[in-house]
Amino acid sequence: MTTTAPTPLAPPAQHPAGPSSTPSSQGTVRPLLRLLPWVRPALPALGFSALAAGLATGCALVIPLVLQQIVDGPIGQRDASGIWPLALILLALGVGEAVLFWLRRLIIARPIMRAETRMRNDLFDRLQALPVSFHDQWPAGQLLSRAVSDLATIRRFLLFGVVFLVVNVITFVAGVGILLALSWPLGLIVGALALPLVVLCFSYESRYQLLARRSQDQVGDLATTVEESVLGIRILKSFGRGRHLGARFGRQAADLRTTELGKARVVSRLWATIIVLPEVAIGAALCLGIWQVAQGTVSLGTLVAFFGVSMILRWPVESLGWLMAMANDAASAATRYFEVMDAPVPITSPEHPVPAHRPARGRLEFRDVHFAFPDASAGQELLRGVDLVVEPGETVAVVGATGSGKTALTSLVNRLYDVTSGAVSIDGVDVRAMSLDDLRELVSVAFEEPTLFSASVRENIVLGRPDADDAAVRRALQVAQAEFVDDLPWGWQTRIGEQGLSLSGGQRQRLALARAVLGGPALLVLDDPLSALDIHTESLVEQALRSVLADTTAVIVAHRASTVMLADRVALLADGRITAVGTHSELMETVPAYRSLLTSEPYAPGPDDTAPHLHTAAGTASAGGHL
Ligand SMILES: Nc1ncnc2c1ncn2[C@@H]1O[C@H](COP(=O)(O)OP(=O)(O)OP(=O)(O)O)[C@@H](O)[C@H]1O
């Protein structure tokens, strides 16, 4: 199978996650509001948490007022006994504040983490539902960073940022109200802070959001490099390219550092201004307050209370900088999350699926099939009118030059991709009209690159048929000549490493073949499944496969004559069409292009080869409908 996944050394693929696509117009609020469906169950807890935080801040705001009573009352009147009740109130307020802060955290943690888990599960489900063409275009690291770090960023904002953004604004408004009540000229000076603060935050938001987005994309690129270098460790070591990739990683890490420093610069500028503003306002109010106390227009207790409240207001103002940063980080993480969640899922079960024939006969038909990969340039069709019928129980080998589209053709059967036009049908039912569950039960596949998961041998084999019993697994293992699994340290329960790396290529192929033939599927699609086997094992597998293929419809992509011999007929794929169909010996005799593919005989297309070379043994319009 030819793959277009980005190679470790190629420039990053154009994917929608690029910083250039930063949707700055989305702002902060809209992406965050879209989290509502997941956050809704946590809203009561968020409300209680905000209430607890608000009450805690309320306690803190009342403390200076009690101090005012102490200063103007017992202290001013030198009545020591009057201090105790007020001191007890102070103590109660302090304890209340601490308990309420603890409660705030306790209430919110569980529901927000539940929301994060649901978002993560939904992302995983979405990734499973998205078509192969989506995964062809998106680097794995970009998806990984969305599933891990972006969701953690959103969780931190929901746990902490959102509550404090609300509570701090309320605290500021309430605090300024108290200050105005204590002394309106002093209150006005502190309250006037709000205007420059709002202007500042708005002016900084768009700059910061751009950097936040860039940094998250760069984390994704880093994750991609790590993933590729770990998966490709053998190649990198063999070619001594580890250092090269290390240099690329270093450059990406340096880019990320530059972006993070840029973020820090923007925040520190904002922060510096935000910290200076209340200091200036409080300083000015202090001068005026002292003058007012000296004039006797304000009591000393009022001045103490005023500064107590002002000090409490410093935190909501000063924290605004990083709360805004947190909100922007969360908004751009949410935007990245929704880029995946909003990606279209074109390959789905129809609303009213046509039931598959039961028992399935397994007649497979490609009718005028055209296909272009979604990311191919316009008009670049790989398949340009494929017509082919595979009768029930028949095995057809698809042969063609490398890159001619054999894998693409077989991928249309179980809808890994959909045809651009034309139709693929099984027992007369268009595969797009069936439910995906039905289709994937009917069609079983084995690819040249066998993917095994980090699970036991048995779990890997029964992947598509979890209810298969041991006898069926044993039969599948026999067909695939994969009984070597009995000799593994824990037999069928042996965990095979990530991607089955602890097994040889041939062993992995045999397990993948066992997985494909398990349970006797109606239709078997094998994409050069024996390429990694030695001649001896290959002939053993072929012997065993023959019994399975005797009554199963099968399409086998074949590169070697030995695999072709498994088939009843062979179809030659060239120039996007089936140009010849017949038995192996017929094609060897009459089709030079075919002969050249399976032997070392050179082939130069002649004038006779420009038109599709259709072997008539099966008859172009025969009763069987073969090409
Ligand atoms: N996801 C993709 N997006 C765009 N082009 C692709 C994609 N996958 C494969 N191709 C291109 O389509 C062509 C056919 O690929 P395909 O894998 O079907 O060929 P093949 O006949 O199976 O080749 P081989 O015999 O080498 O396995 C190749 O030129 C390949 O580069």
Image: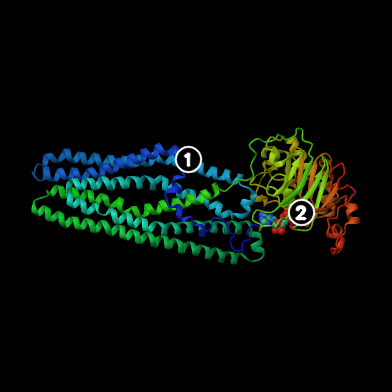
**Residue at 34% of width from left, 53% of height from top?**
320
- Is residue 482 something that shows in the picture? no
Rendered image: mark on residue 532: 2
Q: Quadrant of ligand 1?
A: bottom right
- Looking at the rendered structure, the secondary structure element under dot 1 is helix
Give residue 503's position: percent from left, percent from top.
Answer: 70, 51
**Residue at 28% of width from left, 59% of height from top?**
276
Q: Quadrant of the N terminus?
A: bottom right
Query: Which amino acid type is marked by label 1?
Result: Pro
Q: Is residue 309 left or right of residue 465?
A: left
Q: Is residue 579 left or right of residue 195?
A: right
- Looking at the rendered structure, the secondary structure element under dot 2 is loop
The residue indicated by pointer 1 is: 37
Give residue 153's position: percent from left, percent from top.
Answer: 45, 50
Q: Earlier in the sequence, mark 2 or mark 1?
A: 1
Query: What is the quadrant of residue 238 in the picture?
Result: bottom right
Give residue 403's position: percent from left, percent from top.
Answer: 74, 58
Query: Which amino acid type is marked by label 2?
Result: Ala
Rendered image: mark on residue 26: none
